[in-house]
Amino acid sequence: MKREKFELEFPLRASPKMLFPFLSTPSGMSEWFCDDVNSRSELFTFFWDGSEEQARLIKKQQDRLVRFRWISDEEDGLDTYFEFRIELDALTNDTSIIVTDFAESDDMEEAKLLWDSQIRELQHLIGA
């Protein structure tokens, strides 16, 4: 089944510099994204309730963007990823996180709800 790309935008009251470590470091991500994270260079292992998933960090721009590809997708030859992009509105100085991910059409709503819940956790954590 083919996965479709989707993007979600979440406004946050936080500077890109303050936000970036929460999106790109094991210690930051373990505070909101999963229970724990280990990393060895570009390979990140995420832990949730006794299960674990590995992802490779495939792109990183300081204070702007971080992109991961699940190892299972890589092994299946899929060109999918999940990405956090920080955008700063030049006029209003408002910060947003753009989440890009892929899901099968049957799972699309569930995937969007999961990201919504995850980002709410992050907003709560940083007081945004």
Image (cartoon, rainbow, N blue to C red):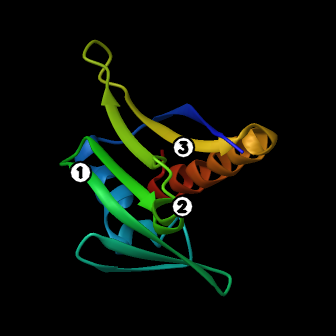
Q: Earlier in the sequence, mark 1 or mark 3?
A: 1
CA gap, disc 1 and disc 3: 16 Å
Tell me where residue 31 appears, x and y as whole percent. Answer: 48, 70
Res 124 → quadrant: bottom right
Which residue is located at x 23 percent, y 51 percent?
Answer: 60
Along the line of sight, the residue nearer the viewer: 85 or 127: 85
Helix, strand or loop at label 3? It is strand
Exactly how many numbered labels are in the figure?
A: 3
> What amino acid is labelled 2 in the image?
Asp
Q: Earlier in the sequence, mark 3 or mark 2?
A: 2
CA gap, disc 2 and disc 1: 23 Å
Q: What residue did someone put label 1 on?
A: 60
Q: Earlier in the sequence, mark 2 or mark 1?
A: 1
Which residue is located at x 56 percent, y 34 percent?
Answer: 5
CA gap, disc 3 and disc 2: 17 Å
> What amino acid is labelled 1 in the image?
Lys
Tell me where residue 49 appears, x and y as whole percent. Answer: 68, 82
- Tell me if 69 is positioned left or right of 50 in this view: left
Within 10 Å of disc 2 (Cα), the crowding (few <14, some 14-19, many 20+) is: few
Tags 1 and 3 touching, CB below 8 Å: no
Q: Which mark is residue 76?
A: 2
> What amino acid is labelled 3 in the image?
Asp
Within 10 Å of disc 3 (Cα), the crowding (few <14, some 14-19, many 20+) is: many
Res 118 → quadrant: bottom right
Q: Is residue 18 above or below residue 96?
A: below
Along the line of sight, the residue nearer the viewer: 111 or 78: 78
